[in-house]
Image (tube, rainbow, N blue to C red):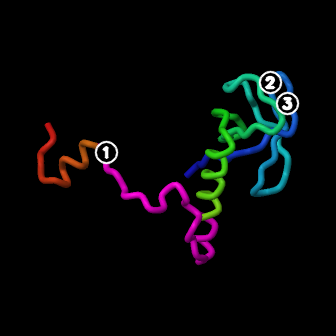
Amino acid sequence: MCIGVPMKVLSAGEFTARCLDEASDMPQSVDIRLVGSVTPGQWLLVFLGTARRILDDDEAALIRSALRSLTAVADGDDIAGLFPDLDNREPVLPPHLEQIRRGNTVH
């Protein structure tokens, strides 16, 4: 499975940006041609060395927290509080699955 990782822009050029990967604490060169110009301090969602989109600070924090939870689960640690966007919220099924759950058939 491949996962997009939030990275913070340290410096930017025309086609690439130097970004910090928090997991390895190592700067990496990231292709930014899909997202356009970026500025230091912005967050990028990076997949296979290419920025897929620009993230705001809140979304980057949520993704980083979810990724930390994967490590915590693998290590057998507690993940309480690592999914703040899901706390106190009832899960919602897509409409076609909700119909099936209620016993209605989907055509």
Residue 75 is situated, as x and y percent measured from the top left of the image, at 63, 75
Disc 2 residue type (three-letter): Phe
Give the magenta-colored segment's residue range.
Answer: 70-94
Marks 1 and 2, the one that precedes in the sequence = 2
- Quick check: 60 above or below 15? below
Q: Is 4 on the left-hand or right-hand side of 105?
A: right
Q: Is 13 on the left-hand or right-hand side of 104?
A: right
| Count of number-bearing discs | 3
Question: In which quadrant is the C terminus drawn?
Answer: top left
Structural crowding at the residue carrying mark 3, measured as other residues with C-alpha within 10 Å and reported as few (<14), some (14–19) or many (≥20): some
Structural crowding at the residue carrying mark 2, measured as other residues with C-alpha within 10 Å and reported as few (<14), some (14–19) or many (≥20): some
Q: Residue at x 57, y 70 (%)?
A: 79
**Cβ atoms at labels 1 and 2 below 8 Å apart:** no
Q: CA distance from mark 2 to mark 3?
A: 8 Å
- Tell me the residue that label 1 is attached to: 94
- Tell me the residue that label 2 is attached to: 15
